[in-house]
Amino acid sequence: MRKRFILAIICFGTLWACQREEIMKVDEEVASLNFPKTKYLSEYKNDSLQFLALFNSGVEEAVLYIPVRLSGKIADTDRKYKLRIIPEESFGVTEGNHFTLETEQVFRAGRYIDSTVLKIDAKEVMKDKVDGRLYIELVPNENFEKGIDFYQYMIVRISGAGLTSQPTFWNKNSLGNYGGTYSAIKAEKFIELNNIPAADWLAPNKSVLFAYAKKTYEWFEANPTYDNGERVVFKGVVEF
C-alpha cells in the first residue's frame, strides 16, 4: 500500500507567535491539550484543514498529522489522551471506509507538541466523490484537563470531487505554454498522471515540467476525451 504523510502545520514558530497571548492564559500547573489554529497559515481556513483527494490520486492511504500542543509541564513519560468525533457536526464521510481515527492516542514523553494521527482512504474518497467533514474534539481524561474552548476542536474537510477553480500551479509553471488554454479536465489529468501533491506545486526544473507535460499530452492523444462536445488537446506552443 502506498502512503502519503501530510504534516498539517509546517511553521510552528509563526503559529505560536500569532497565538501566544491566548495560549498563555492557561494555568501552566495544569496539563491540558489544544489544537493550534491560525488564519495565517495556508493549510488553515479559519478553524479547519482541508484534504483534497485529487492531490493524492496515486495514494491509497494518506496520513494527516494534526498538531496538538501541551499547556502545562512537559512529562518524562508517555500520556494517553482522548478524542471523539461529534456526529452532529460531521457529515459525508464514513469511518472505516473513508477514514480511521483512533480515539485514544499518545502524547509522547519530553514533548510540548505532538500530533493527532488521522488516516484517510484517498482511493475511496475519490471513488465516492466525497464532500464531507469531520469535527474532531479533544476529550478531558485523567491525564489532561480541558483547555481553551476554541482550541478543543479541529474541523477536517474531505473532498473527493474535481477542481472547482484553477489551481495556482497552472500559471506558476506557465502550463499554458505546454497544454494550451486551461480547463479543469486538463489540470485534473496532469495532477493524476504526475502525482502533483498540492495546488501551489512548482516544478523543480524545466526538464521535469517538460516530461510531465509530455506524459499528459501523450495520454490525451491515446485516450480521446471530450469536453462539451470538443476533443481535449493538451498542446501549447511547446513542441513535444
Image (spheres, grey):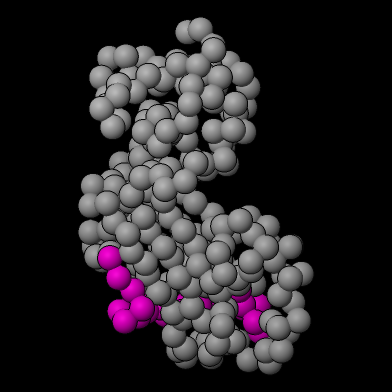
Work out whether 156 lies above or below 124. Answer: below
Considering every residue shown, the one lying at the far front of the view is 229
Between 27 and 178, the one lying in front of the other is 178
Locate residue 177 relative to residue 186 in the image: left or right.
Answer: right
Between 23 and 213, the one lying in front of the other is 213
Work out whether 34 lies above or below 113. Answer: below
Position of residue 115 measured from the top left corner of the image (x, y, whole percent): 52, 65
Work out whether 96 lies above or below 211. Answer: below
Quadrant holding the N terminus: top left
Please identify the quarter of the rendering in which residue 55 is found. top left
Work out whether 133 lies above or below 51. Answer: below
Residue 176 in view here: yes
Position of residue 27 measured from the top left corner of the image (x, y, whole percent): 68, 92
Residues rendered magenta in the picture: 69-92
Q: Residue at x 30, y 79 (%)?
A: 87
Q: Residue at x 23, y 52 (%)?
A: 128
Q: How many marks?
A: 0
Q: Residue at x 44, y 79 (%)?
A: 137
Residue 208 in view here: no
> Is residue 75 located in the magenta-colored stretch of the structure?
yes
Q: Residue at x 40, y 29 (%)?
A: 186
